[in-house]
Amino acid sequence: MDVQACAGALVYDADGRLLMVRRRNRPSQDLWCEPSGRCLPGEPAIEACVRECAEETGLLVRPIRRAGAIRLDGDGTSYEIEDFVCELVAGTLRAGDDAAEARWVSAAELATLELAPGVLECLTEWGALPR
């Protein structure tokens, strides 16, 4: 099985809502997750986290700390996703690149979304749920 390094950004607004995107493409097409994607060859996960967030949401973020990691298997590929808690630096929210939609969600709104595999479990385990 092919192993693909990936990175994601956990970003919160002033109200404690979490930045989420609805994926345009596989894997997890049409499901919601944190802004995330594949690391480029030789790209550290922390840099991929910043790049993917900018590409998918138009927002520039600064990683504060590592949140955790998960390994998901699917489509003949194993995705090793490392997430970072980030602070918002600049930008205007808009869906782009691999994101069909991007928005800030509260805990109540998160409960209504169709989430990608592992998202809710990781957010819960890492103490990273929105308010």
Image: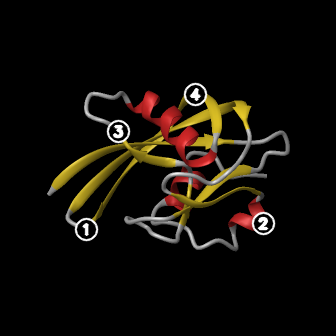
> Which one is nearer the viewer's eye here, 95 or 39?
95
> Which one is nearer the viewer's eye here, 101 or 78?
101
Name the disc covering residue 108, or none.
2
Residue under the image location 42 percent in, 65 percent down: 25
Q: Which residue is mark 1?
A: 75
Neighbourhood count class around disc 2 (C-alpha, 10 Å): few under 14, some 14–19, many 20 upward: few
Q: Position of residue 58 (x, y in %)?
A: 64, 42
Rendered-image quadrant of the N terminus: bottom left
Q: Position of residue 60 (x, y in %)?
A: 63, 32
Q: Callout 3: helix, strand or loop?
A: loop
Q: Considering only order in the chain, which callout, 1 or 3, is on the residue closer to the N terminus?
A: 3
Q: Amino acid at mark 2?
A: Ala
Q: Position of residue 42 (x, y in %)?
A: 27, 28
Name the disc covering residue 88, or none.
none
Q: Which residue is mark 4?
A: 63
- As measured in the structure, the alpha-carbon distance from the residue carrying label 4 to the one carrying label 2 is 25 Å
Q: Considering only order in the chain, which callout, 2 or 1, is on the residue closer to the N terminus?
A: 1
Q: Considering only order in the chain, which callout, 4 or 1, is on the residue closer to the N terminus?
A: 4
Q: Amino acid at mark 4?
A: Pro
- As measured in the structure, the alpha-carbon distance from the residue carrying label 1 to the one carrying label 2 is 31 Å
* Residue 111, placed above or below residue 68: below
Closer to the observer: label 3 or label 2?
3
Name the disc covering residue 39, or none.
3
Q: Callout 4: helix, strand or loop?
A: strand
Residue under the image location 25 percent in, 56 percent down: 78
Q: Amino acid at mark 3?
A: Cys
